[in-house]
Image (tube, grey):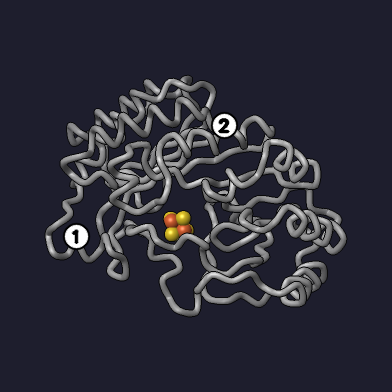
Amino acid sequence: MNYDGDIIRPPSEADSIIIQVTVGCSHNRCTFCGAYKDKSKQFRVRSKDEIQKNLAFAAQYCKRQKRVFLADGDVLILSQKRLLDLFKQVKTFLPQIHRIALYGNTKAIRAKSVQDLKELKKHGLHRIYMGLESGDNDVLLSVKKGETAQSMIEAGQRVKEAGIFLSVTVLLGLGGRQGSIKHARETARVLNCIHPKQIAALCLMPLKNTELGELYSKGSFTLPDARGMLIELRELLQNITCDPVQFMANHASNYLPLSGRLERDKTAMLKAIQRALTGKEVLVQEQYRAL
Ligand code: SF4
């Protein structure tokens, strides 16, 4: 398979065939995100020829895989016609595929009507991964997400209305030490309005090649420590009221791997956090944390 640069995909797509349709992210301004800062990752849509060659490769060598993930950052930004053509091609080359997934940023989602999204679903789009990061407008503004809590709610609800599986990512620590609790509460509020199928909570790890990473190394941005991250996680969990929803805080960046179904497993997860806060649960050591 031929890829431009490193490929980032959600952990749940580990078994999927990855077809790179776009390179980079059309927004690429978030101050915490170092995924596509390299010049080689400047946003572009790969040519039909490039995509077809990779589909042909997958048709030959990935016959047993049943899912496709379309990379990079926000394939959903393509026009409706282009997406429908693309899904048709995926089905032609890979008839065994029963699930197509992609990252959709909020702007791309809002550019589609519910009807458009329903049509994409009919043609195979099963899952959209959306980065909420925070529901706190102050945080969203400071990290240049280019969205507000309200626009995130609208985008998330649109995906839900279209009947597409929605997975939402939030970033613990993004409000800094000072804004930690407000960030957690506002994020929970937005999640409750969206009610996604899945919530993934990662811990922010400031990267050197990002604006936020620079602020962090200068001491202008302070990150909650491990204990602070746990308190923020507890605040987030306590305030999430949507049910049912799969809640995952078991990414390699998390200090305390947690995963469960809300509301069902909320008490058990909160107890685990409490045990960790009182030193009765072992945390992942710094050197083993990763993005
Ligand atoms: S966080 Fe998402 S929207 Fe922001 S720059 Fe990175 S890939 Fe693009």
Q: Pointer 1: residues within 10 angstroms few (<14), some, or many (20+)?
A: some
The kind of residue tagged 2 is Gln
Quadrant position of the C terminus in the picture = bottom left
Mark 1 CB lies closer than 8 A to ligand 1: no
Residue 72 in percent (x, y) is at 57, 63
Tell me where residue 165 sits by quadrant: top right
157 left or right of 273?
Answer: right
Q: What mark, if any, has residue 73 been given in the picture?
A: none
- The residue located at (57%, 31%) in the rendering is 157
Q: Pointer 2: residues within 10 angstroms few (<14), some, or many (20+)?
A: some
Does residue 60 appear in this view?
Answer: yes
The kind of residue tagged 1 is Tyr
| Callout 1: SS | helix
For ligand 1, the image quadrant comes to bottom left
**Marks 1 and 2: which is nearer the front?**
2
- The residue located at (31%, 25%) in the rendering is 271
Q: Which residue in the protein does label 2 denote?
A: 157
